[in-house]
């Protein structure tokens, strides 16, 4: 374990179980490949952030929605022709 100090409050038996569980999970996740982002902007962000495609796509979606809502509000302030 990287942060062995985090388990100091446990007895030796529990420490062994926790260490084995962490080792097992690290091994399990080692083979997982992150999904790819679906948009060009998402792919660019994913390269910079090293996040999963799903997470990056969600960030792009939220940012786009906020921008569209802001533009919609700006349109309300304009006078009609």
Image (cartoon, rainbow, N blue to C red):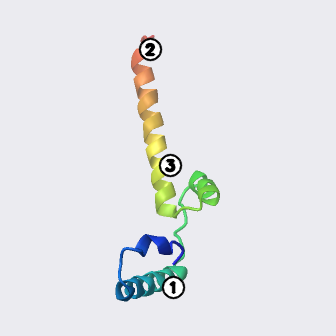
Disc 2 vs disc 3: Cβ atoms closer than 8 Å? no
Give the residue at x 47% y 58%.
55
* Residue that badge 1 annotates: 27
Q: Secondary structure at mark 1?
A: helix
Q: Residue at x 60, y 58 (%)?
A: 43
Q: Is residue 61 left or right of residue 50?
A: left
Question: Which label was assigned to residue 60?
Answer: 3
On the image, the x and y values in percent for residue 1 come to 51, 78
Residue 16 is marked as none
The Cα–Cα distance between marks 2 and 3, rounded to whole angstroms, is: 27 Å
Residue 16 position within the rendered picture, expressed as x and y whole percent measured from the top left? 41, 88
Q: Secondary structure at mark 3?
A: helix
Q: Residues within 10 Å of mark 2 (few under 14, many from 20)?
A: few
Instruction: Check whether the beta carbons of the residues at disc 3 and disc 1 lie within 8 A of each other.
Output: no
User: Looking at this view, is 73 or 48 the one in front?
Assistant: 48
Q: Earlier in the sequence, mark 3 or mark 1?
A: 1
User: Local crowd at mark 3 within 10 Å, few (<14), some, or many (≥20)?
Assistant: some
Residue at 43%, 21% (x, y): give it.
75
Q: Nearer the viewer, mark 2 or mark 1?
A: 1
- Location of residue 48 by image quarter: bottom right
Question: How far apart, in angstroms, are the residues tagged by discs 3 and 1?
Answer: 31 Å
Instruction: Classify residue 17 as left or right of residue 32.
Output: left
On the image, the x and y values in percent for residue 21 come to 41, 84
Q: Which residue is mark 2?
A: 78
């Amino acid at each position: 374990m990287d942060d062995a100090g985090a388990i100091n409050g446990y007895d030796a038996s529990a420490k062994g179980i926790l260490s084995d569980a962490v080792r097992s999970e690290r091994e399990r996740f080692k083979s997982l490949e992150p999904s790819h982002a679906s948009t060009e902007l998402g792919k660019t962000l994913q390269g910079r952030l090293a996040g999963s495609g799903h997470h990056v796509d969600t960030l792009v979606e939220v940012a786009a929605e906020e921008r569209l809502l802001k533009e919609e509000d700006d349109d309300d302030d304009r006078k009609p022709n």
